[in-house]
Image: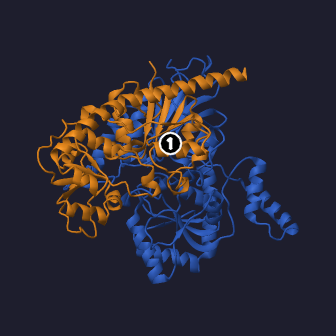
Chain colours: A blue, B orange
Amino acid sequence: MKEDLFDKEGKLQRKIKILDITWHVMHQTHMISALKNDCEFYYLLTSWRSWHDKRFSSVREVPEEINWISRYEPGKYDVAILHVDQASIDQKTGKYKMLHEIDEQIQDIPKIILNHGSPVDPESGMLKQPGDTNEQAQEKCIKMMKKLLHGMPMVVNSYTAASDKEWGWGTPIIHGMPHFTEKEGKEIKQSYKEKLEKDKFYTIEEAYIEYEKKIGKQGWWDLLKEPRLFSALSPGGWATYYNRDVMLALVGILKDDYGYPFYWCKTCFHRTRTMFHPSNFNDYRSYLGRSLIYFDPSIRTPMNRARSEAFFSGCCVVQVEGAHDLERWAKNGENIIIVPNNPKEIAKTLVDLVENRYEEAMEIGQRGKEMAMKEFNPTRYRQNWMDVFEKVLKPIK
Amino acid sequence: MARYAIVDWARFNGRDPKAIGSTFLRADNLVAKDKDFFHWTQGCTSDAIIFQKVYWTEMMRTDKNPKILDLSDPDMIKGSVLGGMDLKEISQYVDAITCSSPELTKQVAKYVDIPTYYVPDRINFDLFPDPKKHTERAKTAVWFGYAHNAKEVLQYYILEGLVRQGLDLLVISNTPFKPEDNYGVNIKNVSYESDTAYYEIQAGDIFINPGTVTNANFKYKSNNKTVIAWKLGLPLALGEEELQKYLNPRAREEESIKRIKEVDEKYNIIDSGKDYKRIINEILKNKCKDTSKVK
């Protein structure tokens, strides 16, 4: 515990010095944005992932707030955030090796584990032996994670992830993202109208970018909705975790039975799928903001960040039933459409929404946005993290 | 005691270090024989960093201690976009460059403004069996390495030469060697396994490694295969003339004695440690000079 961190009344006296590494750059962008007034961020360079690599910096620009360090120096930081997901338990993975090496280096400060995943059999064949049920594989995964973390406090991304349905322990912190308030949204649209009168080629995207520069905050762009279907899932990962089998079947049904392309962002190596590759963050925000429907097939992933981005962008979110935490904020037919885990049913609903229920989908999108502003706001998110930091850093009286 | 970290290509790229020649020779051998060197790990502290074919500009730009870029291939030809590196760019972020062949050293030195040194691929003598004894007429020529290189090196005229000399060919390669035509040579292909490779090589009598391939990848290669073969007691044949000469066991034995002496003198990995330390000291001296200028 650093003596100068809290005063006698237990109030924070200076910024908390956080040691972190590049892991999930979307998550980390929001974390830095929410905590920049309370914390200093020191990112240790690792061989595993580089934010300066275009694969990541095109997804989210490298935040200016990061102090990059080449080596760990004891005594310089207050707390470390280390990252895992279910792949981290496999000793063959870079994730395991990195965690292991960094964990060994850091011996002088508390370490908080941020677990991005859930205990789905990693489908590498490591855990699930012939004859094992999925439940048995999950049990093994949980056991190995416990061993790997050896008592370090763990933060997870959903309440379900912390429940007995998934890991069975952990502190849930639901993400919170910077976004535009209703008033700010109106100001952007007003400024767009004014500039368009002087410059007929002026775009709404330019208006958003200019406004963001002016107020020093990046949000999500709620643009005119085109009647199209869109999704963004991680390019890596596993079939069960992301429910890829259903997604693949859906893409086929939409194409073959309805003649609808499904725009699936940056997610696949499978050549036959229709893909969309945004070249940068603004392209992504523009495409997402102009898509009427955002579909999320995943059930076992904790709170999906891309789905919340779609809510903030005013998209009508269609979600497969059974996903983490739906019961806490989702109201079927009001702020989201929940569909059974059946590709034929999903395809029928998606096409119906696009072809026959455009206005309804727009309204659901707007109510989804209102819900997201309330539930996934950065103020609450910041407070959740500050509570965790206080818990691990404050001296016990 | 100073401690020098080596960020090696194999570990950085998640590959088996034993299967990557340059890492095995230039990093693992050195770490095994000189306690001042160690494999870099995430977040570790060191007094200098050697980037063994690792083009990690982010780290080079961040770390303040002496940094050496160690090259084994002319990757600047490809450029960073194609998985190589941008030499001029990267040379701004390190203090010195070391290269594994004199040809590469000379070429790199033409482009960069920082000191460039030749540090040969050297070997760890502990890993070598006793040299082969030659008592009979040669039966088998041997080549070892990556299968894709074998295809380039073992061209038809080499295979025809082997036939004329009545020699079989043993190819020890990482993946199966499948030439389109064997030109009548009896070819045996054995998988390259790091633990047994040196013994497998000694199943041959002459190491065949024609120096006729002139493309850039080969032009700048180090002589590490030759050094390994010599230490194992095998003579090097570049072409048919030498193959014929080394059919005679006495010629091979004489060559073996001569070359082992040469390897012992020039290619002991312990000398690479000395080379790197000398270079690091030079860097530190120059840094001191720079600082005094600023003052």
Left or right relative to B41: residue A212: right
Q: Position of residue B118 (x, y in %)?
A: 47, 37
**Residue B127, image quadrant:** top left
Q: Residue at x 44, y 74 (%)?
A: A272
Q: Give the quarter of the image for residue B154.
A: bottom left
Camera-side residue: A252 or B25?
Answer: B25
**Residue A227 placement (x, y as % from top left):** 61, 75
Name the element at disc 1. Answer: helix
Q: In the rendered image of this protein, does residue B194 appear above or below residue A55? A: above
Residue that numbered label 1 is attached to: B105
Please state which of residues B26 and B262 is positioned toward the viewer in this rendering: B262
**Residue pictured at 23% horizontal, 44% vertical:** B234
Compared with residue B3, is residue A177 higher up or lower down, i.e. above or below? Answer: below
Name the chain under label 1: B
Judged from this view, the residue extending furthest toward the right is A198
Residue A315 image point, x, y percent: 60, 65
- For residue A63, what is the image quadrant? top right
> Could you tell me residue A55's position as x and y percent?
54, 54
Residue nearer the viewer, B93 or B63? B93
Camera-side residue: A301 or B112?
B112
Residue A183 appears anywhere in the view: no
How many neighbours does mark 1 have within 10 angstroms: few (below 14), some (14-19), or many (20 or more)? many
Residue type at mark 1 is Thr
